[in-house]
Image: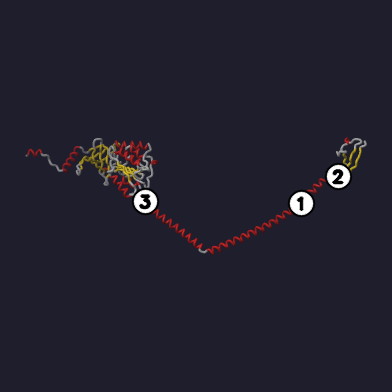
Amino acid sequence: MAQDSDLTPRAWTVSALCRAVADTLDARFNPVAVRGEISGFSRAASGHCYFSLKDEAGQIRCAMFRRAASLMNFSPRDGELVEVRGRLGVYEARGDLQLIVESMERAGQGALFEQFLRLKAKLEGEGLFDPVHKRELPVQPRAIGVVTSLGAAAWHDVVTALQRRVPHIPVLMVPALVQGTGAAPTLVQALQQMYALTAEDNPLSLPVDVILLVRGGGSMEDLWAFNDEQLARVIAASPVPVISGVGHETDFTIADFVADVRAPTPTAAAEMAATARDESVQLLSALAHRLERSVQRQQDRQAQRLDSLAARLGRPQAQLGSHRQWLDRLSHRLHAAVQGQVTDGRHRLLRLSDRLEFSRGQQVQQRVQRLERAALRLSSVDPRRVLDRGYAWLSDENGQALTQAVQFQPGQSVQATLSDGVVPLRVKD
């Protein structure tokens, strides 16, 4: 029996065994420095940080308490390659091996993060992230499309939010894998199927006017399907706006940069997809109230106008009397104006007649004087005046004037015209 007792192993309590393992680790390994890639990084409300360090073949859980976390000069992200210093231990509550990190430094970018940055730079250089390509979301889409995993919590969150905000808008869902090596091709196929539902002649339902691409939070590895290049190009080719709601607010994927709008969570994506029915109802109520007040004011103005017209039509005799007086005044003014015009015309005619008579007398007198002067000038050159002074005008039988002696011939008949008559003459020598 004693021999059997020596072969029987010692029975440890769970907590004692965990403490013993922790002591052994502490004595053999601590302090320890580890290089690895961050995965599943999260910061609790207490300020403590929890994550895993991994490489190609293994991973280890890590905890970094608030004091040590406050000394970091950078914000760790999934996929970053870091070097940490700390102490190995056992978390007794779960019996897990964990590394209590006391300091952390960057050791370069992790492989996944490097791939992410390379693809991001490539697509950004091609203009897929350019804001000019971003489209405005419709205020009230005719139908909303959702691409996600059918069993994911994101699908439940989106449906709940849409049912609460816009229960009147139909929601069409095309399922796809959102995690794992084969997730990216299924996401591409699901989006292409959803694009067929955006057609105006879609026989299944109203055309889809906005698409939600959603998934819950996770590590960079969990979200890696949304960093696929083909998926990014398919999102960029979408005929309608796409809202990307992948991961939590601190998570970023290539799909977020290519999509028209990035939502911090799937629920936020659902809230962005359409204006809530209550808000639309409130807006319509406000517009209806404004329209009612405007119509009421218009009715009041028209009523006042009708009252004024009715008051004026109610006393037609007074209106006739007023118009008769007005017409009498116009008639008197017209008669006075016509009389004044006639009197002015008569006076003007008299003045013109006097001016015409005076002008005509002056013209007659001027013409008589001109005739007298002309007669005087004419008489001064009258040949008879010359004859009166004792001269005679000699001419031959043909009436040609004889003014030189050589024109006379013996026996020639000559006429001498004197002031009182004509005397026939004959040339003797």
> Mark 3 packing: few (<14 Cα in 10 Å), some, or many (20+)?
some
Callout 1, which amino acid?
Val
Which badge, 1 or 2, is on the more N-terminal residue? 1
Sequence-wise, which precedes: disc 2 or disc 3? 3
Q: CA distance from mark 1 to mark 2?
A: 30 Å
- Marking on residue 364: 1
Q: Alpha carbon of mark 3 to alpha carbon of mark 1: how far? A: 103 Å
Quadrant placement of the N terminus: top left
Q: CA distance from mark 2 to mark 3?
A: 128 Å
Q: What element does badge 3 sit on?
A: helix
In the rendered image, residue 127, in percent from the top left (x then y), is placed at: 38, 38
Describe the element under mark 2 as helix, strand or loop: helix
Foreground: 158 or 42?
158
> Which image quarter is the C terminus in?
top right
> What residue is drawn where x is 31% and y is 36%?
115
What x and y, as percent, mark residue 4? 8, 38
Q: On the picture, is 308 further left or further right than 176?
A: right
Task: In this rendered view, identify the residue nearer to me: 39 or 310.
Answer: 310
Foreground residue, 198 or 86? 198
Residue at 62%, 59% in the rendered image = 334
For label 3, the residue is: 280
Q: Position of residue 379 (x, y in %)?
A: 83, 46
Secondary-structure class at tag 1 = helix
Image quadrant where residue 70 sits: top left
- Hey, which residue is sitting farthest front in the picture? 203
Q: Which disc is residue 242 wearing?
A: none
**Residue type beneath disc 2:** Arg
